Image (cartoon, rainbow, N blue to C red):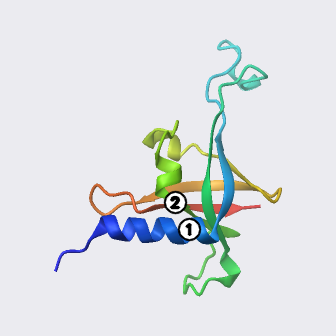
Amino acid sequence: MAIDYVALAATADSLIRANGKSVTFKRQSQTPLDPTKPWRGAGANNNDLTITCVAVVIPNDELDDKEAMRRGDATAYIAASTFGTGNPFTAADLVLIDTMADNEGYTWHVHGVKIINPGSIRVLYQAELDH
């Protein structure tokens, strides 16, 4: 029996949209303002990338995971339809995303974003978060 990943992605999308909140992911510029002095950072003239999408944030102390080590303070599950369409991030940018802000004023540090995609269908994204 074949698994219908398109239907699975649609179910994940509708559940995240129904129970999630608006969040904004940000990747800070990797291009220094002065190439001869890269330690000074991007400065005011940066080219940060941001995207606003819908996510469900679950604190890890409420998860029933049997791992000995916690990965972070929370895990965010992002609807693929809101994160993948018109997305300024490339696959390489996913590892460079460093912050997530939600509509309640919390700012999270992102440890990495994983794509949950069996085959070519992107079902959802998962991000590990710390305060």
| Residue under the image location 77 percent in, 61 percent down | 131
| Residue type highlighted by circle 1 | Ile
Q: Left or right: where does residue 37 sit relative to residue 97?
A: right
| Residue under the image location 62 percent in, 83 percent down | 63
Q: Disc 2 marks which residue?
A: 79
- Give coordinates of residue 100: x percent, y percent: 69, 52
For marks 1 and 2 on the same chain, the one whose residue lies earlier in the sequence: 1
Q: Residue furthest left?
A: 1
Disc sitting over residue 31 in the figure: none
- Give coordinates of residue 8: x percent, y percent: 37, 71
- Front one among 68 and 48: 48
Q: Disc 1 marks which residue?
A: 16
Vertical relation: 63 (above or below) 59: below
| Residue under the image location 71 percent in, 54 percent down | 109
Q: Left or right: where does residue 107 sit relative to residue 38?
A: right
For residue 74, which quarter of the picture? bottom right
